Structures are given as structure tokens and as C-alpha cells.
Image (cartoon, grey):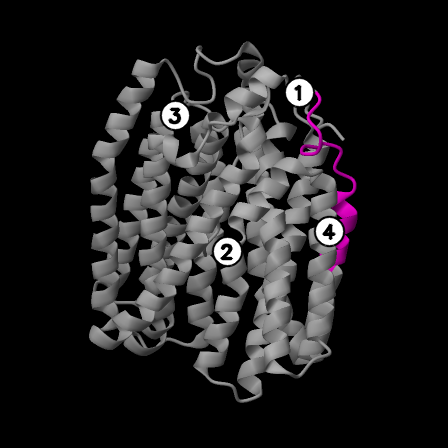
Amino acid sequence: MSFTSFADGTRWSDVYTSAACAFLAGTAMFTADFALTLRLQTEGYGGFAIAALIIAATLPLVVLSPVTGRLADRFDSRALMALSGLLQAASIIAMAFTDNLIALYGLVILNACGTAVNQPVVSALVPVMARRDDLPHAVAMVQTGTLIGFASGPAIAGFVIGAHSSGAALMLAAGCALLRVLFCLDIRTRRGGIRRDLTATAAKAKAAWRLKGDRLLTAMVFGLSAVIAAMCAVNVLSVFLVREVYDASESTYGLIKACWTIGMVAGAWIAAALIRRLDRDVQLAWMLMACLAGVGLMCVGQGLPLFSVLLMVPLNLIGGIFNAGENSALGIALARRVPEAFRGRANAAVNGRVNAAQLIGFLLGGAMSTVMDVQTAFVAVGLVSILIVLACLPVIRRAARADETDGGTPADRPAEAPAKRALAGAAALGVVPLHRG
């Protein structure tokens, strides 16, 4: 099966369907995660069991990233999306029928394997659906679907568990996964499989591409991953900041956490409008660094003594806007600089580093809670994030100068084969939604 692209126009029907799939995937994942967390807490398991659950859901995304990236580039996208949905549905259904904790962890790992396969496939497929001018809006639409799914999953799980049981919530999550399978079969855009339209010369030229060989992307990914590790550390402590320092209610804590996701939805569309004006890759790198610094400033603001806990609402809204901006900036930079045939591997490599940073952040959060108070931890993490950005700036300037000297981005330098340049110009614009919440 050769891949199908639509270089002459954007296939908006596929974009809408992909957004619906992203919504269903986010809803299924977070409904299942929230239901299992409440189930373990209700059955008397402690923090260690819940922490192990989080690790089991995250570790496959890190360990399998080299394999899933190659799968995304070598096999048909529709088949991979459907199989990943079926694997998730089967594992979630099985969760409802087991009481063994070890078996439950194994099923969580299987569910995460389905997510690990689906992420690079979708990230690499979106650029093939949209032409260059429409891509930021297509990205914003798919990202919005994912975020709404993330936000609605816990709410749906809480309602269903309150009215019925955790088993009912898990069956609903499995239904969302199966519905995603049906939706993905309606996506006509394809990539992966046997590439008959690539010449041997172009394939040989692309074989040398590596993420570490692109200094601009390497600096962007390093900065993002380092800041994510820091932010995940304070994410662990956020409940103590709201509930203990300000003595706020559970509903107030839920409102503050929801504001970050709401900010990300708005930020996705703001970033789409801004990126349309950015033609140079280094401008995307500056945008990413500015957003990372903005997230750091919002973290410092939350750690300062506030006269009202409600001041955290605008801080989280603005932080979510910056979060969406950094996601979009890196995603578009990846699509512009990575050859189409390797975009699945590139997205998987970035997602693997991001998820590894999250695991490191969770461990750092536990350690920080034992050596400093919560507000000091927020201020410290915010300042460290800003220092990380400052450390990346010289590297980005040198990488930008190297690009100008070499005559363009790695995906379209004149020294490479004409067939490669044509392919890159037609469909090398994508996004990696790196949602962290």
C-alpha cells in the first residue's frame, strides 16, 4: 500500500475525523486512568500502588518509542490506528473483570502500548492531510479534540462511578476506544507501507537523517524535555499548594486544574494564528523558548504569597496558553525539518524523551517534598526553567547560523536529490501534540 497525500488542498474531512479520534482517544485514556485510580484508593491501596499505576501507564511510551516510530513509517497508518484501538479496547474491558493487582498493572501496560503505537502514527499523518497554509489550523483542531478528551475523561469517570461503578466507567472507556477504531477507518489519507513513489536516490538521501544530527531541533527538544521534568515535579505538589497552603476546597482545586487545560485549548488557536506568520525555523525555536520561559514565570507566580487562591486561576490559564504554544512550535519545526519518510520515528523519539522527562519529574517531585516547602519548590522550579531557556539560547543562535551557511533546513537543502526536495515541500509539515496538563 503506497501512501496517499493531498498536496493540492487540505482534506478537511480527514482533519475533522482525526480531531474526533483524538477526542475519543483522550476520553478513553483518562476515563480508564481516573477509574483505576479511584478503584485502588477505594480498595485501600496506598500511594505506592497508585504511583506504580502511573509508571506502568507511562513507561511503555518511553521504552517502545524507537520501535513504534519505525512501525509508523513502515506500515499502513490506517491499520496501525485500528489495531492500537482494538488493543486498548480489549485491555480496558479486561480491567473490569480482574481483581488481581499484578494483572491490572499488566493490562495498564498493554493499554499504554496501544497509545505508544497510535501517537507517532497520528502525529506523522496530520501533515499529509493539510497544505502548508492550513496546517496550523489543522493542528489546532486535532489538539483541541485531544484536550477536550483529556478534560472530559475524569468528569465522565466520576459521574459514572458515582451513579454505577468503576466497572461501568471502564466499559464506557472501552466503548470510546472501539468508536475510535470505526472513525479511523473513515480517514482516507494514508501513509506508511510500500512507498512506490519514492525513488532510490531520495530514499538513500533520507537514510542519513538523525534527530541528533539537527542541532536546532536537538536544542528545542532538550529545552522542552528539561522544563517538562521540572514542571512535572511541581505538578505532584500542586494539590498540597491549593489544599494545604491556601486551605481551599476540592472544587476549587478542580477549577484551578481545569483552567490549565482551558488555557491550552485557547493557546492552540492563538499559536495557529501566530505560526502562519513565521516562515523561518529559528523563529519557531524562539517561540518555543519564549513559551517555556512564560511557563516558568507562571510557576514562580504560583509560588509567591498570593492574597487569594483564586489568583491561581489566571496564572493557570496563561500557563496553559504558553503550554499549547510550545507544543505547536516544536511540532511545526519537526514537520518542516524532518523528511516525510522519517517523521514517525522523529515524533516517537521526541515523545519518548518527553515521557521520560515526565517520569523523572515525578521522582523529583517526591524528593523535593521532603527537603523544601511547597511554595519554595514552585519558585525554585520556575527559576530553573528560565535558566534552562537561557542556556539553550546560544545553542539555537549557533544552529541558526549553521542552517544559513548550509543553505536551508536539513529537509530541503539544495545539495540533496530533487525528488527528496519535492516530497518535503509537498508534505513535510506536521505537529507533535505533547500534552502534559
Which of the labelled discs sits on residue 74, or is there none? Answer: none
Magenta span contains residue 340:
no
User: Closest to the observer: 243 or 7?
Assistant: 7
> Looking at the image, is 257 positioned above or below residue 75?
below
**Residue 432 visible to the viewer:** no
Which label lies toward us, 3 or 1?
Answer: 3
Question: What kind of element bears circle 1?
Answer: loop
Q: CA distance from mark 2 to mark 3?
A: 29 Å
Count residues near mark 1 (Cα–Cα under 10 Å), then give few for <14, some for 14-19, many for 20+. few
Which label lies toward us, 2 or 3?
Answer: 2
Quarter of the view holding residue 408: top left
Question: What kind of element bears circle 4?
Answer: helix
The residue labelled by disc 4 is 83
Residue 264 relative to residue 407: left or right? right
Magenta span contains residue 184:
yes
Which quadrant is home to the N terminus?
top right
Residue 174 relative to residue 279: left or right? right
The residue labelled by disc 2 is 63
Which of the labelled discs sits on residue 9, or is there none? Answer: 1
Q: Amino acid at mark 4?
A: Leu
Residue sitting at x 69%, y 66%: 91
> Looking at the image, is 413 positioned above or below residue 378?
above
- Which stretch appears magenta? 176-196
The residue labelled by disc 3 is 281
